[in-house]
Amino acid sequence: MEMLLVLLLTQDKPVSYHRDVMPILKANCMGCHNPEKKKGKLDMTTVALMIKGGKEGPAFVAGNPEKSLLVQQISGAEPAMPEKGDPLKSEQVALIARWIKEGAKDDTPAAGAAKGAPAVYSALPVVPRLAWSPDGSLLAVPGYHEILLHAADGSRIVARLAGGSPRVDSIAFSADGKWLVVAGGAPAQFGEIQVWDVAGRALAKSFKVSHDMLLGVSLSPDAERVAFACADKTVRMIAAADGKELMKFDSHTDWVYGTTFSSDGKRLLTSSKDRAMKLIEVSNGQFIDDVNKLLESILCIARHPKENLVLYGGALGTPRIYRMQDNQGRTAANNDTNLVRQFERQPGAVHAVAWSPDGALVAVGGVGAEARLYRVADGARVATLTGHEGAIFALAFHPDGKTIATGGFDGQVRIFDVKTGKLARSFVPVPVAAEEKPAEARSKGP
């Protein structure tokens, strides 16, 4: 402790919690002291929660590192914490002690605070998702800190909806087209659900959930509930009106990637890296059953537009359609009783699936730089959509069923004719700044 005081007195620049202290705590302490584990009933993911403390009291006393439990636990020849792993370096301990000595100020930026201006792009970002408005007039494309609304023909950007989440993973329009719901966040920092007023181009509501990314968002048929998957292995459902948590489901053992409501909104189906699609009773959060035989990590799902059938794509590359019902008929032989149809194996992992509006066709894309269209009735491939430069992560049929939009690694959005499989048009979804040439090069001309 004497050494710490010497170090405290020899430094001038104030310590920043967000820049200097938080990275140390995240790397060494938050693995055990987070909302899910709370070892010793202590959550260290925010300054406020450290002040609240655990069963031993507050983690620190502002202005007094010598009486702060945190400093006591990480100091000395044989520090008590971290319990597992190497002790903190002396300079790390000194930095934390200095921060406390200086008053333990919290300079963390507000989680998900909206950016003042739209992003400026120097390169094309990956297109993770696409969504058509129900009337087919708009195509929503995620960007950095924003969602871009494009005219249906890709000729212009109609609006840029700039929000707080640097990453947007999933988007969904309400059935009436009034709302656009967004799931995203900042990895290992926060998750956020945004609800946008489409006509007003305004953020109507924003709800911070979890300390990691939110994925796979879906809306109940009445648009009153929002379900989403989480990187923390949970599935959650909130009220769209006020963000009140209606359900937290934690039976998955790995990242959850997708959610979808049944046609009547009474059940919720989830999909995960743990290979399971789990069926949940919405009214009470009760787990009903695993719908499928556990074969592969499930990376994407889509429900039939009218029926309780779900199409999934996974790590092994064989798309399958399942009934959304319990799987009690599997018996000891682990029969895949809910399997309706499987399609040909793809070139690699499947990252995007979609149903045509009439449910007669499905689209599949992923590793392999092409998307494929299949007839559901017999599983036959009817078209191959080519020309992509890299994996496909997003597929969306236009509401009229005549075209389908694709997006992925190369950052382009392409629109194909469903009947012929030919490219109708393509466009860059974000405004990319022209590269500035050096003054000498400009003066010499071409």
Image (cartoon, helix red, strand yellow):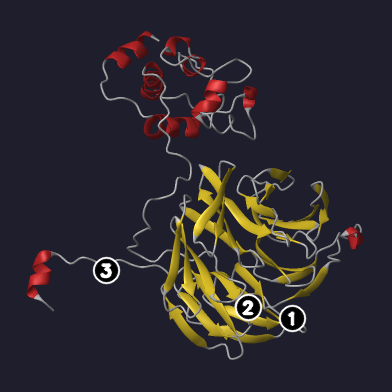
Name which quarter of the figure residue 433 lies in: bottom left
Q: Which mark is residue 399?
A: 2
Image quarter where the N terminus lies is top left
Name which quarter of the figure residue 419 lies in: bottom right
Q: Depth check: give the residue in front, 312 or 245.
A: 245
Q: Which mark is residue 434?
A: 3
Residue at 59%, 42% in the rendered image: 210
13 to 165, vertically: above or below: above
Task: Determine crowd level at label 1: few under 14, some 14-19, many 20+ residues with C-alpha closer than 10 A.
Answer: some
Amino acid found under the numbered disc labelled 1: Val
Residue at 32%, 63% in the rendered image: 122
Residue at 34%, 11% in the rendered image: 5
> Distance of mark 1 from mark 2, alpha carbons?
18 Å
Amino acid found under the numbered disc labelled 2: Pro
Name which quarter of the figure residue 52 lies in: top right
Q: Depth check: give the residue in front, 308 or 188.
A: 308
Amino acid found under the numbered disc labelled 3: Ala
Position in image of residue 113 (x %, y %): 45, 45
Position in image of residue 301 (x %, y %): 68, 65
> Distance of mark 3 from mark 2, alpha carbons?
35 Å
Q: Which mark is residue 376?
A: 1
Task: Determine crowd level at label 3: few under 14, some 14-19, many 20+ residues with C-alpha closer than 10 A.
Answer: few
Position in image of residue 149 (x %, y %): 48, 68
Q: Which mark is residue 444?
A: none
Instruction: Indicate left or right for 93 with 442 as reference.
Output: right
Q: Nearer the viewer, mark 3 or mark 1?
A: 3
Q: Earlier in the sequence, mark 3 or mark 2?
A: 2
> Distance of mark 3 from mark 1, alpha carbons?
45 Å
